[in-house]
Image: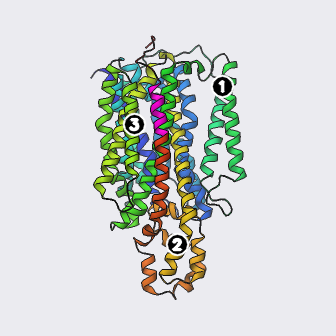
Amino acid sequence: MEYKWTVLSNTTLGILIGMMNSTVLLIALPAIFRGIDINPLSPSSFDYLLWLLMGYGVTTSALVVSIGRLSDIYGRVKLYRLGFIIFTLGSVLLSITFGKGNFAASELIAFRVIQAVGGSLLMANSVALITDAFPITERGKALGLNQISGLLGSILGLIVGGILATINWRLVFIISVPFGLAGIIWSYKSLREISLPNKNEKIDIYGNIDFILGIVLLLAGITYALEPYKNMPLGWYNPKVIGLMVSGFALLAAFPFIEMKVKYPMFRLELFKSRQFSAGIFAALLSGIAYGGLMIVLIVMLQGIWLPLHDYSFSVTPLWAGIYMIPLMIGFVLFGPISGTLSDKYGARGLATAGMLVVMISFILMMKLNYDFPYAEFAFFIFLAGAGNGLFVSPNTASIMNSVPANHRGVASGMRSVMTNIANTVSIAMYFSLLLSAFEQKLPAALYNGLISAGFPSNIADLVSKMPPTAALFAAFLGYNPMQSLLSSFPQLYSELSNIDPSGLSSVLSNTWFPRVIAPAFMYALRSVLIISSIIVLVAAIASLLRGKHNINNNN
């Protein structure tokens, strides 16, 4: 086998297991929390839920640029191999988590961070290794094939997590271990350094500390903003959130000035003088903001509304939501390699720009959906979204990597990854905020009127309708019946619930009552999200168009 294909296959394995582990928890969390005896929807446990969901992304966002720079200095293959070792260690530790309750949850978060450090080493180096190994006439095709494995890993994470969680929650983490061991052995046997490390350069200690702290504080603030604060469904006005975000922004604002003063900067700001690089990075950031959180919102719509209305119990909706999102993957798989191959010949501008416009069209088409839509219609719309993203990602990544000198590919790859990760975190927080804001306006009245119609006393209807909508949204997201979760939050009402007409209580606790109550508010919020996403994608298309004609750095 030619060495370039060895590199592609090895990095594809790394991306596959990295992305699989980023989504496997979405469906396995209920089984994990049951295994450690925690209710993730109780106020005291909500922090653990948030950090298990978001901690992996926050860690990788904070580290990938620094790791990319270290790879340029010490060698990409060396740090890539280390990534497999740390990732596998984290997976082993997660699978043998001991104890119960909050202690076990804290262990899981800590071990998840260790796993994310390994994932950061894999993510920061995989694209750079492919760029090193493939000639410029084949890079787009190779990156397209590599990106497919990432999306495939995301979908597999949902499906594998759903299957293994029904057997034993520890298997969700054990499944990564054989893949990690295979990656360790294979990378040590087959990979070698092609690009010479810059061993004469020094580590930018101040820049690294400033950037890592800035990213951690900013993303921690965004994560905590998803928690209710006082009587508000979200925490954007929480002084802790404001303090974290302001501190993070201040440190990141100082970063360019630090980099201009040090002899060996962590990131070469002059790379942004290249229109190919800056336009590609900006387009990737905007695409991630528009696309990442919206996909989560669509999964929540399937889990919380469409699947229960079509006779799926809440407990199986996370698995089936992943299965019903497969057309998205098919669109990406079909068009990713094609666009990568064509970009090698014709350049990235036209293909990447067209991809963003196709995504925008798919978002506009989704606005016509009602909550009980025919699946074939929805499948076609998300297929278009996947196809558009497939057209965009490979050419845009190749354009970014082709625009930088060979000795800066590691940090350039890290910058691309951190923009994608930041975009996904910001996107999830932004779209959940929009959803919850719409719920805050419309859900209390809908819940109150629905409960009164079902024969509930006004005091119970009033109490339940004032519950933060966050609890209901996350209940549906995690595969719990939201009304059972809401009512169980009020043990003092059990005696009164026994006096309610059994048929009314049975109706409220059925699979279809809550979806029909929240559907109007949810679809209103979804259309608002789609409008905003369409505008962001249009700006991304303009940024992509402004990258200029096919332009290659002479040192490539």
Residue, disc 3? 357
Amino acid type shown at disc 3: Leu
Residue density around tag 1, few if under 14, some if 14–19, many if 20 or more, within 10 Å:
some
Amino acid type shown at disc 2: Leu
Quadrant of residue 463 within the rendered picture:
bottom right
**Nearest to N terminus: mark 3 or mark 2:** 3
Residue, disc 1? 256
Front tag of 3 and 2: 3
Residue, disc 2? 447
In this rendered view, identify the residue nearer to me: 184 or 110: 110
Amino acid type shown at disc 1: Pro
Residue density around tag 2, few if under 14, some if 14–19, many if 20 or more, within 10 Å:
some
- Identify the residue shown where x is 48% and y is 14%: 196
Whether residue 209 is visible to the viewer of this picture, yes or no, is: yes
The image shows residue 362 at horizontal and vertical percentages of 37, 44
Q: Quadrant of the C terminus?
A: top left
In this rendered view, identify the residue nearer to me: 285 or 137: 285
Front tag of 1 and 2: 2
Q: Residue 446 vs residue 382: left or right?
A: right
Highlighted magenta segment, given as a residue range: 536-547
**Nearest to N terminus: mark 1 or mark 2:** 1
